[in-house]
């Protein structure tokens, strides 16, 4: 079992930046990929970004491409989401997820086995 704990959310003005962190409770050698999803009130949880743990290949949804960067620190068992040029439409609860092995496209929720509790990101206009 892997527990994921997110941190780094908060309130920021449009155009600002935040960095989210997601720490795994144990070594990530058994993790194939990690991702970030977000859920705004009344909306479905949607894919934001993912990173394949072994070779650091990254994937992004179109709306954050060029503004967000996902990265990982193997020594700290942590994945990060650097969010720049934030917009009010980025406001959501952000969730970290981890998948043990490849089961399909990284933008699908079902390919992930573990989820964090979420961290709120609010972008004011």
Image: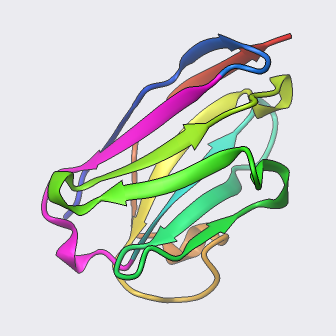
Q: Is residue 56 above or below residue 38?
A: below
27 drawn magenta: yes
* Nearest to the observer: residue 72 or residue 46: 72
Q: Is residue 117 visible?
A: no
119 drawn magenta: no
Please tell me which residue is depicted at 19% across the width and 64% down the height of the picture.
1
Relative image position of residue 125 (x, y in whole percent): 86, 10
Please tell me which residue is depicted at 76% across the width and 49% down the height of the picture.
64
Q: Is residue 116 above or below residue 10?
A: below
Q: Is residue 1 above or below residue 111?
A: above
Please tell me which residue is depicted at 47% across the width and 35% down the height of the picture.
20
Q: Is residue 19 visible?
A: yes
Task: Please report the bounds of the magenta region as a residue range.
Answer: 17-32
Instruction: Name the image quarter holding residue 97.
Output: bottom left
Relative image position of residue 44 (x, y in whole percent): 76, 49
Relative image position of residue 22 (x, y in whole percent): 36, 44
- The reply, left or right, for residue 38 in relation to residue 52 is right
- The reply, left or right, for residue 8 in relation to residue 82 is left
């Amino acid at each position: 079992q892997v527990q994921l704990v997110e941190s780094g959310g908060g309130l920021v003005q449009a155009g600002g930046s935040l960095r989210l962190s997601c720490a795994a409770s144990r070594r990530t050698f058994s993790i194939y990929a990690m991702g970030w999803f977000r859920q705004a009130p009344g909306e479905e949880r949607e894919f934001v970004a993912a990173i394949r743990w072994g070779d650091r290949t990254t994937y992004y949804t179109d709306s954050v491409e060029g503004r967000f960067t996902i990265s990982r620190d193997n020594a700290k068992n942590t994945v990060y989401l650097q969010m720049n040029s934030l917009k009010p439409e980025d406001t959501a609860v952000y969730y970290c997820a981890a998948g043990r092995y490849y089961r399909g496209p990284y933008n699908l929720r079902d390919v992930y086995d573990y989820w964090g509790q979420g961290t709120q990101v609010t972008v004011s206009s």
